[in-house]
Image (tube, grey):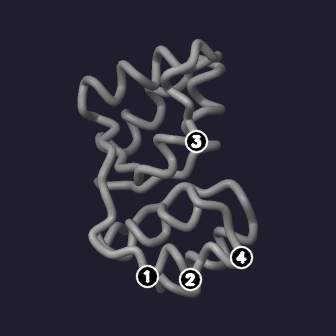
Amino acid sequence: MLAICNTSPLLNLAIIDQLPLLQQQFQRISIPPAVEKELMLDKALPGSESLRRAIQSGWIQVTPLRQMHVSRTLRFELDAGESEAIALALELGATRILLDERDARLAARLRLM
């Protein structure tokens, strides 16, 4: 089952060494480029190494957006990672999106249902 994910769920689970829970639940996670940037994978931060390994192994995939108009519109109310995650879910027809912020969940519900 394909799921789209924002930064915080990935980062928080990676920090507590529980990232495999997402793989067990969804098999594959797609993230937009803004989420990859927010994860700061080029830095030696808690959780970074397990996130890099997950991306290298392919179960977390960075998926570019084909069109940016939805993401740009959402940027008026949400941050870049949340905006691109919702836009990517719309583009891919994903049935699952992991968001930790209430405003982002509301924006996703309004657009994805």
First in residue order: circle 1 vs circle 3: 3
Residue 44, quarter of the rendered image:
top right
Percent from the top left, x then y, of residue 59? 29, 35
Residue at left 24%, top 32%?
58
Mark 4 = which residue?
Answer: 77
Up the image or down, 106 lies above or below 53; here it is: below
Which x, y percent locates residue 36?
46, 41
Mark 2–mark 4 Cα distance, whole angstroms, equals 8 Å
The residue carrying mark 1 is 69
Q: Are marks 2 and 4 in contact (CB under 8 Å)?
A: no
For the residues labelled 4 and 3, the Cα–Cα distance comes to 17 Å
Query: Which residue does the image show at 56% across and 56% down from the upper left?
Result: 81
Which of the pair 11/42 is nearer the observer?
A: 42
Q: Residue at horizontal 30%, vertical 52%?
A: 63
Residue 90 image point, x, y percent? 38, 76
Compared with 73, 9 (above or below) is: above
CB of mark 4 within 8 Å of CB of mark 3?
A: no
What's the distance in space between the residues labelled 1 and 3, CA to CA? 20 Å
| Type of the residue with mark 1 | His
Query: Which mark, by number, is residue 73?
Result: 2
Residue on which the image places disc 3 = 38
The numbered mark, 4 or 3, whose residue comes first in the sequence reads 3
Task: Check disc 2: other Cα within 10 Å, few if <14, some if 14-19, many if 20+.
Answer: few
Are dots 1 and 2 in contact, CB under 8 Å?
Answer: yes
- Under mark 2, the amino acid is Thr
Q: What is the secondary structure assignment of the residue under circle 1?
A: helix
Q: Residues within 10 Å of mark 4 (few under 14, many from 20)?
A: few
Q: Secondary structure at mark 3?
A: helix
Cα–Cα gap, marks 1 and 2 = 6 Å
Q: Earlier in the sequence, mark 3 or mark 2?
A: 3
